[in-house]
Image (cartoon, helix red, strand yellow):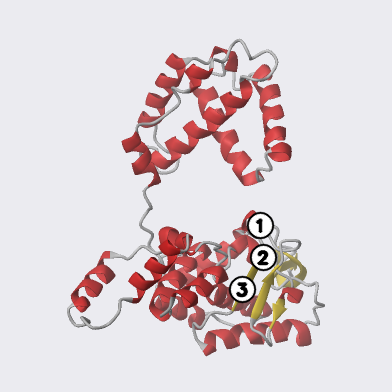
Amino acid sequence: MTNYNPENERIKKAYFVYLKEADQKSNTTINGIRKAILRLEEYTKFKSFKTFNKEQAIAFKKHLKSKTGERSGTPLAKATILSTINALKSFFGWLRFQAGYKTSIKVLEIDYLNMSEKEIRAAKAPKRKSFPSIEQIRKVIFSMPISSDIEKRDRALIAFTFLTGMRDSAIISLQLKHIDLSREYVNQNPNDVKTKFSKQIDTFLLPVGDDIKAIFIDWVIFLKETLLFDMNGPLFPQTRLGQDKTMSFAPMGLDTKPWSTASSMRGIFKKGFENVGLPYFTPHLFRYTLVHLGEEKCTTPEEFKAWSQNLGHENTLTTFNSYGYVDHHRQGDLIKGLGNKKNEENKLDAIYAHLLQNK
C-alpha cells in the first residue's frame, strides 16, 4: 500500500522551508501542520494535491468528524478538527501560487475547508482544567527524599516550578547566571532560555512560602559551593549515567549538562505525585494554581498586572481568559459570600474594569 507520494513530498518540503524561514514558524508549529497535511493524504490514499476540490474538502471534513483518536479511542476534539482544517486552508492558499498548481487549485474550492460558526465556538471554548491545589503541591515537595544529589535536584525542581510558574522548556534551559538570589529574580533571557515566542521575561519568586523558597535557595548554594558549578552551568543538570557492578547502566549522580527535552522533568513530576497517592499533574498545570493564587492575593489592578507579567503574559486579559477559570465549588463559595460583603468592593470587578478601560 502506498504511504507517500513523491510529488507531494517535494512540495511539502518547500512549504515547510517557507514556514520556517519566511513565516518564522516554530518547529512545534510546523510539526502540527505536517500532521494535518498527512491526515488529508492518508484519507485520499496519497493522491496528488492537484486533485483537491470542494467535494474532497467536504468529504474530508465528514471523515474527521467520524474519526477517533489513536490513543483515546474517542472522537477527535473539535479543536483538533479546527486546527487541522485551518492548517490545510493555509497550505492550499500557499499552494495555489506555486508553479504547477496555479491552474489546479481554485480559491473558491479552498473556502470549503471550513466549520460552522457553532462548531468554531465549541472548538475555541476554554477547557476546564484540573490543576493541583497548593496543599497537594506542598505534600509532594515535602514528601520527597533528599539523600542523594539527584533527589535534591528533583525536589528543588518542583519547588522552583511552584515558585515561578515557568514553562518546562524554559526551566530546563536555565543556567546559574540567570538566577539572582539577592533580588529573588530569574532572568529569562531568550538568548539562552527557551521562552515562549522568544520573549524576554522577568520573573520574581512568588510568595508561596518561605520554606519552599528555602529549598530552592539551598539548591543554588549547593550547586555553587559543593558541586562547584560555574555560572554557565545548568540550574537543573541531567543525571549522569555509568556502569554499576553488574555492568548495567545506572544513575551515578549529576552531570554538568542540561536536559535536551522536558521529558525527564515531567517524569520527575509524575513520580513525585504518584509517590504520595495523587494523580499526576504536569508542570504546566502549576501555572493554573498560581493564577488562582494571584486572584486571591492581589487586591489592585497593578498587583495583578505584576503577577501576570511574572508568568510571561504581556496582556493581563490573557491570564484571566486562559488560566482564570473558577471551578464550580469555588464559584458556589464566592456567590454565597457575596451576601456578607455588601459594602466591600469586589476586587476582581475592579481589575476587570481597569483592564477593559486600558485595552
Dot 2 amino acid type: Ile
Residue drawn 57% across the image and 24% down it: 92
Which quadrant of the rendered structure holds the N terminus?
Answer: top right
Secondary structure under the numbered disc 3 in the rendered image:
strand
Dot 1 amino acid type: Thr
The residue carrying mark 1 is 261
Compute the Cα span from label 1 to label 3. Answer: 22 Å
Binning the other alpha carbons within 10 Å of mark 1 as few (below 14), some (14 to 19) or many (20 upward) gives: few
Earlier sequence position, callout 1 versus callout 2: 2
Q: Nearer the viewer, residue 240 or 69?
A: 69
Residue 280 placed where, x, y %? 45, 64
Residue 308 placed where, x, y %? 51, 69
Residue 240 placed where, x, y %? 74, 68
The residue carrying mark 3 is 203
Q: Nearer the viewer, residue 155 or 32?
A: 32
One can see residue 108 in this view: yes
Residue 185 placed where, x, y %? 65, 79
173 on left or right of 317: right
The residue carrying mark 2 is 172
One can see residue 44 in this view: no
Dot 3 amino acid type: Thr
13 up-or-down from 342: above or below:
above
Q: Nearer the viewer, mark 1 or mark 3?
A: 3
Point out the residue furthest to the front here: 357
Earlier sequence position, callout 1 versus callout 3: 3
36 up-or-down from 198: above or below:
above
Point out the residue furthest to the top here: 103
Secondary structure under the numbered disc 2 in the rendered image:
loop
Binning the other alpha carbons within 10 Å of mark 3 as few (below 14), some (14 to 19) or many (20 upward) gives: many
Secondary structure under the numbered disc 1 in the rendered image:
loop
Q: Are marks 1 and 2 in contact (CB under 8 Å)?
A: yes
